[in-house]
């Protein structure tokens, strides 16, 4: 466990050595400011936006995952390009320990910022339990998407392209808000759909048990698949 924590801290420090990555750490603060201070005046001026309030919250929560999706992707691509990955491949700890160390801080950091967002947003009374479920579920997007991207790309340029593509993919399930309820789950092929529906259920005071369980199971299966693919390609 000590090795995992040490490697996690070393990986996190890499962010602060690269100014282009360091600037992304302010992104959650911008989103938080928009939700708390930017959105209320708009809602007051344009009443029709109240209907779309859950969508604004969904977008803010999911976009918080994109900070470390970008940062971790760039760090891993750089590690691959400089062949540092080959060194990690022969270190005396398992590939599982490597993956845990790489995503421990990004995952917990993403959980924390969404807990804070859900606590201080002024629009809905969300219980601590539901807050934790949403935050821990949403943060799984970070390792799933980072490992998926790094299983495909070979350099930074490709990484930038795929990050933009994945950023659009995470938002596609928003379309489920504009179709009849009986067909909304056709968007369930996208893992973020189950996160979105969990958040919407909370805002409508509907139980999130079944929806959140589906979300966790789906993301854990995807995490298992992309982890195996990543391990086969990253250390060679």
Image (cartoon, rainbow, N blue to C red):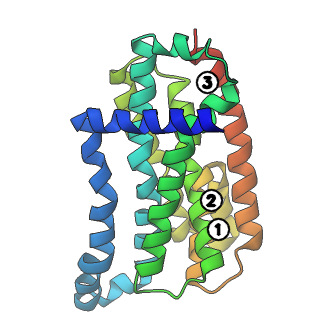
Relative to 217, say whether 41 is above or below.
below
User: Which part of the image, by quadrant, shows the C terminus?
Assistant: top right
Checking the image for residue 188, the label placed there is none
Place of residue 115 in the rendered image (x, y in percent of width and height, measured from the top left): 50, 69
Distance between the alpha carbons at the discs numbered 3 and 1: 27 Å
User: Distance from label 1 to label 2 (Cα)?
Assistant: 6 Å
Looking at the rendered structure, which numbered label has been put on residue 137? 2
- The residue that appears at 72% across and 50% down in the rendered structure is 218
Q: Are marks 3 and 1 in contact (CB under 8 Å)?
A: no
Q: Which mark is residue 133?
A: 1
Which residue is under mark 3?
230
Residue furthest out toward the front: 2
SS class, disc 3? helix
Crowding near pointer 3: few (<14 within 10 Å), some, many (20+)?
some
Q: Position of residue 150 (x, y in %)?
A: 51, 26
Reply above or below: 54 against 48: above
Q: Is residue 174 above or below residue 232?
A: below
In the rendered structure, the answer to whether residue 87 lies left or right of residue 184 reads left
Q: Is residue 149 visible?
A: yes
Q: Is residue 197 visible?
A: no
Contact between marks 2 and 3 (CB within 8 A): the answer is no
Element assignment for label 2:
helix
Question: What secondary structure is found at the residue carrying circle 1?
Answer: helix
Q: Residue at x 68, y 40 (%)?
A: 222
**What is the C-alpha distance between the residues marked 2 and 3?**
21 Å
Q: Count residues near mark 1 (Cα–Cα under 10 Å), then give few for <14, some for 14-19, many for 20+.
A: many
**Residue 207 as seen in the image, left or right of residue 76:** right
Mark 1 and mark 2 in contact? Answer it, CB < 8 Å: yes
């Amino acid at each position: 466990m000590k090795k995992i924590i040490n490697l996690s801290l070393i990986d996190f420090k890499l962010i602060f050595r690269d100014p282009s990555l360091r600037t992304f750490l302010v992104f959650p603060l911008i989103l938080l400011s928009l939700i708390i201070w930017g959105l209320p005046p708009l809602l007051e001026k344009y009443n029709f936006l109240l209907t779309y309030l859950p969508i604004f919250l969904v977008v803010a929560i999911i976009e918080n995952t994109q900070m470390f999706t970008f940062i971790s992707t760039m760090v891993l691509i750089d590690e691959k390009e400089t062949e540092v990955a080959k060194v990690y491949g022969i270190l005396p700890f398992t590939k599982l320990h490597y993956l845990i160390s790489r995503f421990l801080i990004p995952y917990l950091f993403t959980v924390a910022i969404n807990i804070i967002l859900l606590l201080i947003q002024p629009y809905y009374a969300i219980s601590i339990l539901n807050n934790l479920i949403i935050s821990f579920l949403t943060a799984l997007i970070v390792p799933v998407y980072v490992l998926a991207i790094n299983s495909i790309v070979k350099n930074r340029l490709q990484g930038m392209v795929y990050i933009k593509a994945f950023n659009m993919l995470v938002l596609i399930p928003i379309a489920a808000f504009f179709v009849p309820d009986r067909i909304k789950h056709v968007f369930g092929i996208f893992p973020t759909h189950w996160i979105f529906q969990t958040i919407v259920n909370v805002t409508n005071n509907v139980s999130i048990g079944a929806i959140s369980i589906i979300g966790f199971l789906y993301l854990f299966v995807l995490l298992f698949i992309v982890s195996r693919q990543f391990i086969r390609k990253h250390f060679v």
